[in-house]
Every structure is written in structure tokens, then in C-alpha cells.
Image (cartoon, rainbow, N blue to C red):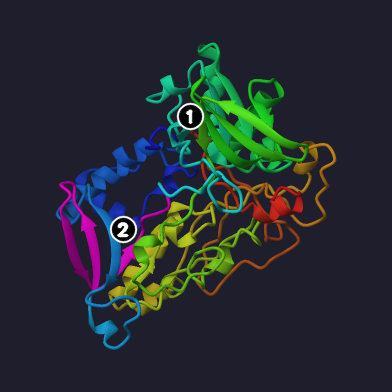
Amino acid sequence: EWGHVRLFSPWRYDTDAAARRLLEPTGWTLPDSDALPTGEELVRDYLAPLAEVPELAGRVRTGTRVVAVTRQGMDVTRTVGRDEQPLLVRTVGPDGAVTDLAARAVIDTSGTWGHANPLGHSGLPAPGEDEAAPYLTGPLPDVLGRDRDRFAGRHTLVVGMGHSAANTLLALAELAKAAPGTRITWAVRGSSVARLYGGGDADGLPARGALGTRLKKAVQDGEIELVRGFTVARFTASSSDQAVRVIGATPDGESVIAADTVVAATGFRPDLDMLREVRLDLDPAVQAPAKLAPLIDPNFHSCGTVPPHGERDLAHPETGFYLAGMKSYGRAPTFLMATGYEQVRSIVAALAGDREAADTVQLDLPETGVCSTNLVTDDQLPGAGAQEGGCGTSCATPAAEPTGQAGTQAAGGSCCGTAAPEPISIGVGAPAGLGFTTGIEHGHSGEAERADA
């Protein structure tokens, strides 16, 4: 579904050491380590070959959806003898058949894709949002490919301020050059979009900085109409002109945007319904494992590093059950694949009885990039308050130096949590392309500082 999108990280951070050990005897070689693959290339050149190696070919069940995890013979309330029973995973196969699988351990790495945040405010769908579904798209439509006819010559409203929104906006601007009548409106709740424009030439990721500059120029040149301070209040559909009307609250009162299509690029949240019968220890705000949440909470981490973390931080009261990967980050939008690989390595080491290996957690990630506190002054609504100290959210990729689980980087004078951040490029060799690398930085605290909430 997002195969056309270029990833945030280059190949060197997108493959796992254990996977490479399985692939290399088959003649597989790592693609250009500095290139940024698309989602399609990640599947074609890495995941599909990995699924076919002899050690995995008979173990991967495709076309199968997990609908629930529980403890065999027990619901979540039963305690006596609980750990003596296997976990039970209920699945639905490609033919619709329901199968229950018993397991000693379950690692839920199902991510957050397909479970998008609503367009309405306060975490709730806006009135009329469900009825407007025919006019809505997911966060990353293929504007220049399979979905082109839906956008060409029409008016599109993009809602959101992450890299998913930027991907779509840049693609729509390119489409508008070839398809007369294509109109683009970009609506955000905040008074500033400086965080998404980035640091330009000062960005630790030059390709991202250049694309942020392009997005800013497209707005300034009138190719994209930017509406700031717009909070979606409700939707109404119009049968007369086949458009949907998005009614928003703004500082100047109610405003209406009529559009043919609305791109909902508002982020994701984990699907926890399938886990109602297992005992979880989740942070009530971030919805991440309680020990991990303070390390990634976007209310407090506007930039900086995430210390390496492993099995002990990811365990739950339900023995043998773990959340890993993007889903382990709950609603925090800063996950990197390399982090997930190390999470799973640590969990599997613990399941294999190798406590020392499970606790020796290391990460090799790109260093934090530019961290600026002055970007916001270039892009605010008239009368919006200036940032009152603290750090903005213009840092590049969140990162951690290779270190043991107990070691973290000491906070220094830098906004990013290190005394002297050294930006490095991870985009060397990446095609220019239209894609805007995904993975927005911690931003909620920065939005609060800029009255962007």
C-alpha cells in the first residue's frame, strides 16, 4: 500500500544481521548501503527473499490475519494456573478459515499501519467523518501512480503535518503541473509548519532538508494553499457537486473547505482490541510498554536519543507475550526499523534462555542532526506567541550511540540531549525523487511551546 514511498533510513539500517546471515548463503547481497529504498524495493530486495530461505520458507503463513491473542482456556480475569497454559493466537486464513494456534510465546509486531488517528479533534472522529469515508483516503495515496485519476483535475485537501502529508503534497504539486485544474489545500491545526519545513541546508539529512525547502517554496509560490489554525469540527457531503465540506474551527471563527478528496495524514495508533484478553502493562498516555514509554514520550522528547532497550523493557505481566516494533512505541511516532530488529533479537535471546545476550543491547543508528530553536520565527500566524525557551522539534533522526542497555548519553547543552551533536548524512546516493522520507520527530512538546497544540 505504500510501496511508492521512499524510506526514512538507508539500506544499512533497514536490514538485520540475523537476516543477512540467512540470506548471504543464497547469493543475496546488500543493496547500496547509502541508498534510501522505497517500500516496494524493501519487499522485493529483502523481505521476499528472506521469506524464501530454507530456514523460513515453511514457517511463514501469508494472507493470514491475527484477530485475537489470549491464554488457552482462560480470559484475562483468571489467575490460578495461568502460566501453565499456552498462549492462544486466533487467526483467519486466506480462505476465511479460523485457526487457533498454541504458542509458548507471542511477539506482536503488527505495527500501526491501517489503524489511523481520526481527523477530528480531541482524539475522536469528527461528526460526519464515518459518512464522509468515500471522500477520504489513507495517509499515503499513490498520487502519481495507481491513484492518479482520483486527484488529477480535482481539489484535494491534505490534513496533517507529518512526513506522510509532505509526501502527498509534493506529489500533488508535481501532478498539478501536468493535470490542469488540480488544486491543493493543506490544513494544519498549528500556527506554524516550520517543524515540517525543517532546517534546509542545515538539516543533518540533506535530502530531507532540500525537500522541506521545496515544500516551503511550493506554498510560497501558491502551488499549495496552506490553511493554518484549522481544527476539523465536522463533515457534510454535498450530493449536488459531489464534494465533501470540511467544517473547521479557526482563530477567526468557523471556516469551510469543499474538496473532492481528503487525505487523512494524521498519524497512527496501535490496535489494542485484539489484545483485550492478555495482561498488558502499558503507559496510559503513550500506550507503549510502561518501562519504554518514558524514553519515547513525545510530550517530553522533542528531540534527542532513545537509549537501547530490550526484553526487560518490553515484557508484560502476561508471561511470554511481547510488543515489539512500531506497535511497541504506541502513539509515539519516532520508531526506526533498526530499533525493532534489536528489540526482537533481545526477546528471542531471553526465550532461548540466554539472559546475558538478552541484556546486552546495542544499537548503531545515525546521529542526531540539526537542532534549532529559531525555525519557528519564520512561519507563524500573525499574533502567534513566540517560543518560550526550550527546544524546537527540528532535530533529524532520533538516535543512540552504540552502548549497553544501562548506558545512556548524558544530556548536555544541546537541544538534542548531547553536548555536541554531529550531523551525518544518511541520504548519500539516494535518488532525488519526489518522496519525502517518512518518520516525523517527537513533536508534541514543540507544538505546545509554539502554541501549535
Amino acid type for the residue under numbered disc 2: Ala
Residue 77: x, y in percent? 35, 80
Place residue 383 in its image quadrant: top right
* Magenta span contains residue 96: yes
Q: Residue at x 52, y 63 (%)?
A: 402
Residue 18 has which mark?
2
Specify the label residue 431 is tagged with. 1
User: Toward the viewer: 122 or 196?
Assistant: 122
Secondary structure category for the residue under label 2: helix
Q: Nearer the viewer, residue 327 or 261?
A: 261
Q: Residue at x 29, y 38 (%)?
A: 44
Where does residue 295 sit, x and y in percent of width and height?
A: 57, 66
In the depicted structure, whether residue 53 falls above or below residue 260: below
* Magenta part of the chain: 87-113
At horizontal 60% and vertical 50% (from top left) the residue drawn is: 441
- Tell me the quarter of the picture where residue 76 sits: bottom left
Q: Is residue 321 visible?
A: yes
